[in-house]
Amino acid sequence: MTNFAFLEAEWPSLYEAATKASNAVYPDPRTACFYARRALELAVQWMYKHDYSLLLPYQENLSALIHEPTFKKAAGEAIFNKARVIIRLGNQAVHSNSTVLLHDSLTAVSELFHISYWLARTYARKEKPEPGLSFNPEDLPKTTVPKQTIEQLQKLEASLREKDEKLFLLLADKSAID
């Protein structure tokens, strides 16, 4: 059982990134933090695409998206702060040579769970996750996966950023049409 099973039906790409983060917590904390940040980006982008009360900010980066006042109002202070933690840990994983600790990967994935749970309870059109569902670190796999180097993660980040920029342009066009 995965902590993020409730995402699979309505948010398959978010589920995939969250599962990659979960699967990497123990064997590769750096990769877990990277994928937690990626999953957060997907969740926030989904919100901007589907919640018409959210206004696009002046920049397209994740930090600008979560600091936009309409996002902060919709998400609330707790979700906003959890997003900030994930962004900090994800950026550290990609841009710092310092060791990423197991505690960091557990924190990133736990905070991602809480944000994902809030997203699903707030926006799910079909079945919502059960009330009181909580993150269970015992459900995290202890298997090994090949570790990603900082360079590999930076290349992956650049590729994903390029895709995200194209999506941002589409979202901006949608806002202009609205």
Image (tube, helix red, strand yellow):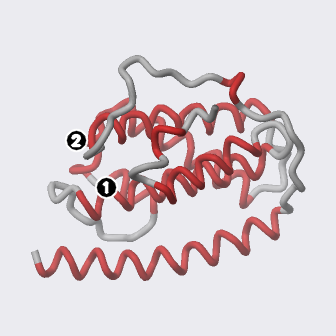
Quarter the N terminus occupies: top right
Q: Amino acid at mark 1?
A: Met
Q: Amino acid at mark 2?
A: Lys
Q: Position of residue 16 (x, y in %)?
A: 59, 54
Q: Residue at x 68, y 51 (%)?
A: 20
Q: Residue at x 54, y 53 (%)?
A: 39
42 sits left or right of 76 in the view: right
Q: Residue at x 18, y 74 (%)?
A: 175
For this orientation, the residue located farthest to the left is: 178
Q: Is 4 or 46 nearer to us in this picture?
A: 4
98 sits left or right of 12 in the view: right
- Choose top left, top right, bottom left or bottom right for residue 119: top left
For this orientation, the residue located farthest to the top is: 132
178 sits left or right of 14 in the view: left
Q: Position of residue 150 (x, y in %)?
A: 81, 63
Disc nearer the start of the sequence (1/2): 1
Residue behind mark 1: 47
Q: Position of residue 134 (x, y in %)?
A: 51, 21
Residue behind mark 2: 73
Q: Is 127 or 155 nearer to us in this picture?
A: 127
